[in-house]
């Protein structure tokens, strides 16, 4: 039998990584305004650096208020994160990737996408030079959120 509390405890111990100075990196789902502000700054800097100064039309969109954000933080400093957007089977609202008419249910016909809860993981932003040390912990926290939401 799967025990979510034990699993979360395991993930906390496993992915509470210590930096060389003894400061831990915490991976967590959050709606904290200060953490999200720092996350959006990282996201905009990433777009500027990777896309030659071109930002997307909006870093914030209507999906944000219905999404969960996972961040990696060291103390109060956000080091990276991503967004998880959920879709219920009865919900006709497309996921962000489905904007413009690209429906996952038609692309993935062999999967029951339209009849099960699904999620999109997007908008990864990572502190420069920390990508390798952060990505695994962020994915583990995303996995915990998906298991908790039964996706």
Image: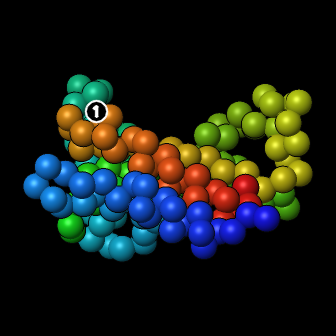
Determine which quarter of the picture holds residue 33: bottom left
In this figure, which residue is indicated by the disc labeled 1? 54
Picture residue at 58% right of the left edge, 52% below the top:
143
Q: Nearer the viewer, residue 24 or 75?
A: 24
Instruction: Report the residue that reaches farthest toward the left.
Output: 21
Give the quadrant of the C terminus.
Answer: bottom right
Instruction: Give the secondary structure at mark 1.
Output: loop
Residue 16 lies left or right of residue 2; in this view the side is: left
Total numbered labels placed on residues in the image: 1
Residue 25 lies left or right of residue 99; in this view the side is: left
On the image, the x and y values in percent for residue 22 come to 15, 59
Residue 57 lies left or right of residue 76; in this view the side is: right
On the image, the x and y values in percent for residue 73 come to 28, 60
On the image, the x and y values in percent for residue 110 come to 88, 30
Residue 83 visible in the picture: no
On the image, the x and y values in percent for residue 36 come to 33, 64
Residue 53 lies left or right of residue 28; in this view the side is: left
Give the quadrant of the N terminus.
Answer: bottom right
Mark 1 residue crowding within 10 angstroms, few (<14) / some (14–19) / many (20+): few
Q: Nearer the viewer, residue 94 or 121?
A: 121
**Above/below status of 67 relative to 55:** below
Picture residue at 74% right of the left edge, 64% below the top:
2
**Above/below status of 20 relative to 102:** below
């Amino acid at each position: 039998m799967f025990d979510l509390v034990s699993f979360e405890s395991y993930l906390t111990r496993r992915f509470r990584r210590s930096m060389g100075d003894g400061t831990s990196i915490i991976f967590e789902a959050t709606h904290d305004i200060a953490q999200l502000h720092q996350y959006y700054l990282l996201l905009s800097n990433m777009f500027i650096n990777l896309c030659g100064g071109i930002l997307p039309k909006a870093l914030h969109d209507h999906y944000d208020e219905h999404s969960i954000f996972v961040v990696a933080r060291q103390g109060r400093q956000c080091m990276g994160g991503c967004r998880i957007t959920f879709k219920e089977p009865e919900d006709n609202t497309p996921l962000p990737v489905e904007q413009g008419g690209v429906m996952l249910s038609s692309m993935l016909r062999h999967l029951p996408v339209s009849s099960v809860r699904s999620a999109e993981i997007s908008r990864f932003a990572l502190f420069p030079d920390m990508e390798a040390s952060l990505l695994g912990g962020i994915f583990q926290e995303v996995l915990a959120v998906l298991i908790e939401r039964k996706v």
